[in-house]
Image (spheres, helix red, strand yellow):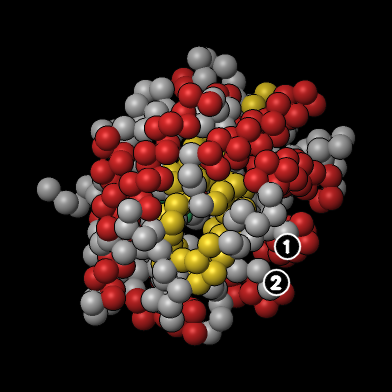
């Protein structure tokens, strides 16, 4: 099934393999596309994957999570982003943009010394940072930033959008009772915690229309006390399905939950696909496509997930850093990725560019 085509909204993917969003550290200091980034994406597209989701792209300067990340908070970025989408399209590959605001998981050093913004001022022990609670006006500004970014993304030739609603970034922070302690329109119960995402969703839809693929990466579980559980997440997913979202990528964890998102040492088959149970749960109750990410390393496991109907699309991040042509190798008979999940590629601040540190 892995190499069967798949319809998603108004597009057709040539297979069911997805490159999950992966920050590349290859934009220039101002967040523009570079030749190095285009080469990196060309290798991925040539490597046979059906859909590439970009690394997280910044919708507003107050949400920067890392240096040299791609930006889309201004019309100036469109023309170079177009070069990126054109490069990928040459190889019969589709490309979605992942839109992000980092919220409380931004470092003040990347925000000119300012504390990061968040729904509530909840201390994060993993970063030793207490964010500043956003005002109503700031919330409306960020919703605008997501919708403006989506218009630019469409103009730049992206085939679809993924809202980053996972991993403890701003959208996740509004959804999670752990990080959202507000008692106003934006928080207080699960319906009000959903308002921020709902308004982003509706604002983007106004820009891109109903047929354009609009998807989200969502935490199945926050893995923190008072955070979202899989049943909370399922309810959020049901609301999103009701709104008309085209697909949900299931992930989990936040900075505070430590090593739940990008797990180490996935060496045995049984350790693979560590969010599989949540995606199977989502599949039982939802009819929209579910994308599964997290520790998938072998073709056999990927096929088994698809055969059992536990997900519709299979996403990978680290294996494609090491082997951008892994999909082609899978199609030629290889069964297991070379990636050993050492997380050398996660040293965002130390590495010159994101790359596999096992090579050379
Ligand atoms: C270097 C690196 C950068 C990442 N950047 C992003 C990102 O920008 N957005 C995102 O949603 N996830 C990001 N992730 C998480 C991956 O998309 C994926 O969810 C996680 O690595 C688990 O999948 P894997 O086992 O196939 O690597 C990143 C992971 C790595 C290793």
Near mark 1 (Cα within 10 A), the count class, few <14, some 14-19 or many ≥20, is some
Q: Which residue is drawn at 52% across and 15% down?
A: 113
Q: Residue at x 26, y 43 (%)?
A: 39
Q: In the rendering, at what x and y percent does residue 73 appear?
A: 55, 28
Give the image location of residue 282, x and y in percent.
65, 70
Q: Judging from the image, what secondary structure is the residue with disc 2 in?
A: loop
* Lower position in the chain sequence, tag 1 or tag 2: 1
Name the residue at 66% across, 37% down: 147
- Whether 228 is drawn above or below 136: the answer is below
Q: In which quarter of the image is residue 271?
A: bottom left
State the quadrant of the N terminus. Answer: bottom left
- Dot 2, how many residues are within 10 Å of its Cα: few (below 14), some (14-19), or many (20+)? some
Q: Can you say whether 250 is above or below 187 in the image? A: below
Q: Residue 241 carries which label?
A: 1
Residue 286 marker: 2
**Position of 275 relative to 144 (above/below):** below
């Amino acid at each position: 099934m892995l190499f069967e085509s798949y319809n998603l909204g108004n597009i057709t993917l040539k297979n069911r393999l997805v490159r999950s969003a992966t920050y590349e550290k290859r934009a220039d200091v101002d967040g523009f596309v570079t030749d190095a980034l285009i080469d990196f994406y060309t290798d991925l597209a040539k490597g046979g994957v059906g859909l590439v989701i970009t690394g997280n792209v910044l919708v507003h300067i107050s949400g920067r999570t890392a240096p040299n990340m791609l930006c889309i908070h201004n019309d100036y970025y469109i023309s170079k982003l177009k070069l990126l989408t054109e490069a990928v399209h040459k190889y019969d590959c589709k490309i979605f943009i992942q839109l992000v605001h980092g919220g409380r998981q931004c470092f003040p050093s990347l925000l000119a010394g300012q504390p990061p913004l968040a729904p509530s001022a909840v201390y994060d022990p993993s970063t030793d940072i207490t964010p500043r609670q956003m005002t109503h006006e700031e919330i409306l500004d960020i919703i605008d930033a997501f919708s403006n970014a989506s218009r630019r993304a469409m103009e730049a030739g992206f085939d679809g959008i993924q809202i980053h609603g996972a991993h403890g970034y701003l959208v996740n922070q509004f959804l999670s009772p752990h990080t959202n302690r507000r008692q106003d329109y934006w928080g207080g119960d699960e319906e009000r915690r959903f308002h921020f995402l709902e308004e982003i969703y509706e604002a983007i839809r106004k820009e891109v229309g109903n047929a354009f693929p609009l998807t989200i990466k969502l935490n199945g579980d926050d893995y923190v006390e008072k955070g979202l559980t899989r049943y909370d997440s399922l309810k959020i997913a049901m609301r999103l399905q009701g709104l008309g979202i085209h697909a949900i990528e299931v992930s989990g964890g936040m900075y505070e939950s430590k090593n739940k998102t990008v797990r180490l040492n996935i060496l045995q088959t049984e350790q693979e696909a560590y969010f599989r149970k949540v995606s199977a749960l989502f599949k039982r109750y939802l009819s929209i496509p579910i994308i599964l990410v997290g520790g998938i390393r072998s073709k056999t496991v990927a096929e088994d997930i698809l055969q059992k109907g536990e997900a519709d699309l299979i996403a990978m991040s680290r294996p494609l850093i090491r082997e951008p042509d892994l999909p082609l190798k899978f199609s030629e008979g290889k069964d297991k990725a070379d990636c050993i999940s050492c997380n050398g590629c996660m040293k965002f601040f130390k590495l010159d560019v994101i790359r596999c540190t096992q090579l050379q």
